[in-house]
């Protein structure tokens, strides 16, 4: 009987270990999936803005008072403009396309909220090994709840300019938290790369990240100016939008000129990585990817400036800027991998040795 008990206990212990190991593996894969999903939401958010669908649903969390929005004006009361007025002002004429674009954006936001919730639950498997992964995953969940509240505020304030910028910054914060936790979860699995002159590389990496982040914020300000001028001039005068936004703000000129500094700093970063990182290693490949994305981003920016801001390029331009910042975070983490995670690696190694 005693031998049967010990055999059953050992089998149960082994099953628990395998379950925990599987949860760790699932967390890593699901975490990556969640990051991609958040970027998809940023793209859809860009489509919402470029199509002018931000107020396609004038209320929140419902849409025209319904959980499934209308597809035709006949489904709304005759005085719907007054019933669903925002800040005391009547809403625009009903547009089914705008309504459903905004509604799909909200549905995707809810789905990603569940993704991040699942990621937080899965992160519990790291609690004994690395509590920071669990804590930061929960922090990402809290951030997405705040993001939902901010989304409601954006609607209730009739797309207030400052709220839209804060909404975008919060999305980038969520991406950053997820990237950090997922990379940290690979601690002890991926091999770190040795680089020379790490202090100089860090200096230019953080400087280029800061400038890229500021450039993205400037871009959101330009986007807000476009929203203002588009309402004033209308779609038929789209070719006059650039001239119009330069009359109400200098942000466009600053954003355009700032792109030169962004590109130069990144060229310097890529050169430093080429000289000091492992040839064709992970860090160099990330650097090359970053440069390619930035070049495409600059090209899309030039096309928008000189060809009447084509609708399809607006969300793509924003997505490229967001992805570039994400790659920046990855670069900084991998450049400083030993410094950031060395203590944890030592602790894990000691734990494995004691178990053996």
Image (tube, rainbow, N blue to C red):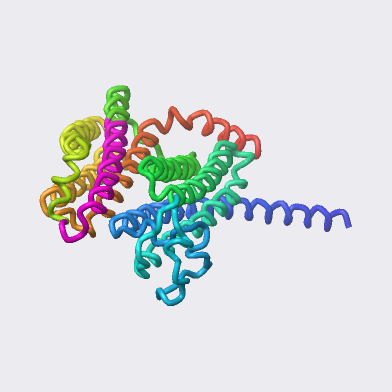
Q: Assess whether residue 159 is covered by the magenta stretch.
A: no
Q: Residue at x 48, y 58 (%)?
A: 59
Quarter of the figure with residue 351 = top right
The quadrant in which the C terminus is found is top right
User: Which of the pair 138/257 is nearer the observer?
Assistant: 257
Q: Is residue 141 above or below residue 58?
A: above
User: Which of the pair 132/20 is nearer the observer?
Assistant: 132
Q: Residue furthest right?
A: 1
Residue 53: horizontal and vertical position, in percent? 35, 60
Q: Assess whether residue 214 is covered by the magenta stretch.
A: yes
Residue 315: horizontal and vertical position, in percent? 28, 54
305 on left or right of 326? left
Q: Residue furthest left?
A: 306
Q: Residue at x 18, y 47 (%)?
A: 301
- The residue range painted magenta reads 208-237
User: Which of the pair 157/259 is nearer the observer?
Assistant: 157
The quadrant in which the N terminus is found is bottom right
- Dominant secondary structure (helix, strand or loop) of the stretch shown in magenta: helix
């Amino acid at each position: 009987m005693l031998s049967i008990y010990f055999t059953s206990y050992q089998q149960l212990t082994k099953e628990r270990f395998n379950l925990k190991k599987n949860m760790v593996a699932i967390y890593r894969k699901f975490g990556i999936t969640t990051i991609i999903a958040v970027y998809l939401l940023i793209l859809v958010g860009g489509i919402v803005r470029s199509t002018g669908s931000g107020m396609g649903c004038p209320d929140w969390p419902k849409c025209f008072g319904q959980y499934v929005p209308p597809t035709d004006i006949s489904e709304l009361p005759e005085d719907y403009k007054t019933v669903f007025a925002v800040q005391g002002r009547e809403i625009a004429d009903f547009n089914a396309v705008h309504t459903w674009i905004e509604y799909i954006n909200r549905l995707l936001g809810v789905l990603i909220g569940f993704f991040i919730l699942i990621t937080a639950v899965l992160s519990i498997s790291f609690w004994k090994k690395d509590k920071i992964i669990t804590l930061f995953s929960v922090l990402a969940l809290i951030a997405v709840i705040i993001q939902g509240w901010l989304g409601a505020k954006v609607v209730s304030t009739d797309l207030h300019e400052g709220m839209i910028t804060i909404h975008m910054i919060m999305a980038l914060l969520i991406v950053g938290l997820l990237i950090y936790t997922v990379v940290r979860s690979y601690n002890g699995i991926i091999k770190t790369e040795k680089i020379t002159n790490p202090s100089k590389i860090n200096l230019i990496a953080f400087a280029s990240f800061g400038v890229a982040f500021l450039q993205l914020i400037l871009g959101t300000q330009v986007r807000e100016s476009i929203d203002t001028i588009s309402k004033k001039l209308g779609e038929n005068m789209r070719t006059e939008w650039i001239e119009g936004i330069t009359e109400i703000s200098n942000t466009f000129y600053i954003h355009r000129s700032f792109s030169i500094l962004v590109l130069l700093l990144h060229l310097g970063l890529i050169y430093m990585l080429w000289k000091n990182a492992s040839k064709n290693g992970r860090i160099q490949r990330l650097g090359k990817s970053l440069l390619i994305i930035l070049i495409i981003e600059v090209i899309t920016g030039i096309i928008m400036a000189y060809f009447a801001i084509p609708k399809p390029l607006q969300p793509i331009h924003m997505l490229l800027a967001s992805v570039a910042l994400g790659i920046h975070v990855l670069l900084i983490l991998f450049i400083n991998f030993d410094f950031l995670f060395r203590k944890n690696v030592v602790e894990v190694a000691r734990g494995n040795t004691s178990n053996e």
